[in-house]
Image (spheres, rainbow, N blue to C red):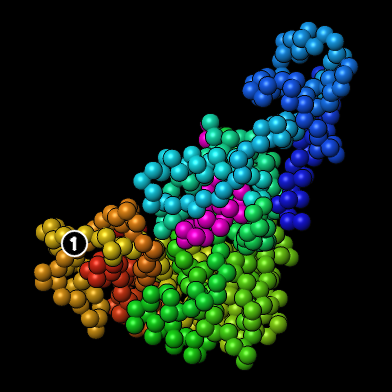
Amino acid sequence: MSILVRMSQDVRRDEEQSTERRAQILRVNYLDTSQLGEKPLFRDILPIDQMRQYRIIPIQADDHTILFGITTTTSQQTMNALTEHFTDHKISFSLISETGFRDYMLLYDPPEQVEYHDIDITSSESAAQVSQISDLLSQVRADDMLAYLVSQAHQLNASDIHLETQANNIRIRFRIDGVLHPIATLDFDKYRILIGAIASAGNVSTNADTAQQGHIAQQVTMADGTLVDINVRLETVPTIHGMDAVMRLFNMNREMYNLDQLGLSDEQRKVVDDIIAKPSGLVLVVGPTGSGKTTTLYSMLNSLVSDERKVITVEDPVEYQFDGITQIPIHSAEAGNDGSFADKLRAILRLDPDIVMVGEIRDNDTAKTALQASLTGHLVLSTFHASSAAAALTRLGDIIGQNPLFVSAIRLVMAQRLVRRLDDASKVAYAPTEPEMAKIREVIESLPEGTERPNLEGLQLYKAGSSPANPFGFSGQIAIREQFRMTGEIRTLLETPGSLLSAQTIEAAAVKSGMRTMLQDAMLHVVAGRTTLDEIYRVVE
């Protein structure tokens, strides 16, 4: 039995207990319909439309008695009318749960067999499709609902599933290539069951008044026999209408995590290959949430795994599970005690690793421990939240103070963002305006010496087009990057006592040392026709 099935049963049990307490308050009999073995149907007592309208179900009947199941919304007027109508029968009533009522209605008025439809975000009839998928979800159990959404999200290469509570319903959206697309809506009764099952599987509480994090990793066999791997990071937050949730999807295909898939330029790849050839020091990959930092680190790790090396990770949570790597989970709620990143990191350093990945550097203790580990022959890989490569050093300095370990420890700082890639089949060429051309020339001419500059004569730019297969004009994403090593001007700056270490001075020194900025990297993609000016201005400051 799957975790979600068990959690759905727990939610049902809670609902039945609540209904029983309500029956005691109202001084009416209570009946737990989930405990009934056989459920005979009495179709000639009431029409189906009246059962649905008046919220009443005939549960037991013979020549002399009729037992009706009622809900908390069944009116006293309805019960009086039934008693007066069936004068030759003894009429009795028992309170049943809302789920019990819905289950009986499905027996009296069964829906047509559920057909799972593939979601097509390119459909011009998006409103009709949202309605169709909403109807489908309303008919299936909670674990099938989640499995279907996850399988469709993977099929559409979505990165996240958003469950958003609103005043009248719950909206479901997928983030695809960085943009959200409406998929379906749910009513609150159905969502309560779904979010209860998801929260229990992800080890979070539906009653919490603070944001929470969880992780769901399991296999679910849907009612139609389809086997779905569910591997998501769960984020929840209470809102004025209920609990919102975002599920980040993890793709377990190890072949995706290799350096050839990262889109590194020749210069960037040469630096990464050099680090892999001589694995020691600290490598930081920085950027906002959803910029592909973890994918970049795992691609590096994948290239480093061998029989001669011991690779250990400490993560919150473990996002991708790979053979040949010892992966240690940690939970945010444990930070500050024996389960903190720094404590776990010190523990794994005693296990004699060659390579260590720290999911994220968050505090002084973890930063210092990572720096010290990188100075003692280990290669330490980690992510860090910063807006640029230069800002990463200033933020790290804010955390641990001015520290001479910087220069000796850090091998590489790489910052990245994701922009949408133009669909080659539908993109539309156009001649750039004079202001656009002036900006392009300015950026291209500022490229570091030794960087090959593209020919801008007769340059054509591209904008997103549209086609029946892809009305949005984009297909996939491109990582734009900037990176530097501790060489040249930047090393001199950091080794000079009393230097002003602002993000601006560090970036200027890195540029003098040959760094290509993120804007320059992005502009080369624009000139090559892979993305648009609007797209890079949307992402790059």
- Residue situated in front as seen by the camera: 133 or 325: 133
- Residue situated in front as seen by the camera: 526 or 448: 526
Relative to 416, say whether 8 is above or below.
Answer: above
At 11% across and 59% down in the image, what residue appears? 434
Quadrant for the C terminus, please: bottom left
Relative to 334, say whether 510 is above or below.
Answer: below
Q: Is residue 318 left or right of residue 453?
A: right
Relative to 280, say whether 199 is above or below.
Answer: above
- Residue situated in front as seen by the camera: 162 or 493: 162
**Residue 314 in picture, x, y percent from top left:** 64, 71
At 73% across and 50% down in the image, what residue appears? 5
**Residue 513 in picture, x, y percent from top left:** 32, 80
Q: Which residue is mark 1?
A: 429
Q: Is residue 417 left or right of residue 16?
A: left
Tell me which amino acid carries mark 1: Ala
What segment is highlighted magenta in the picture? 145-167
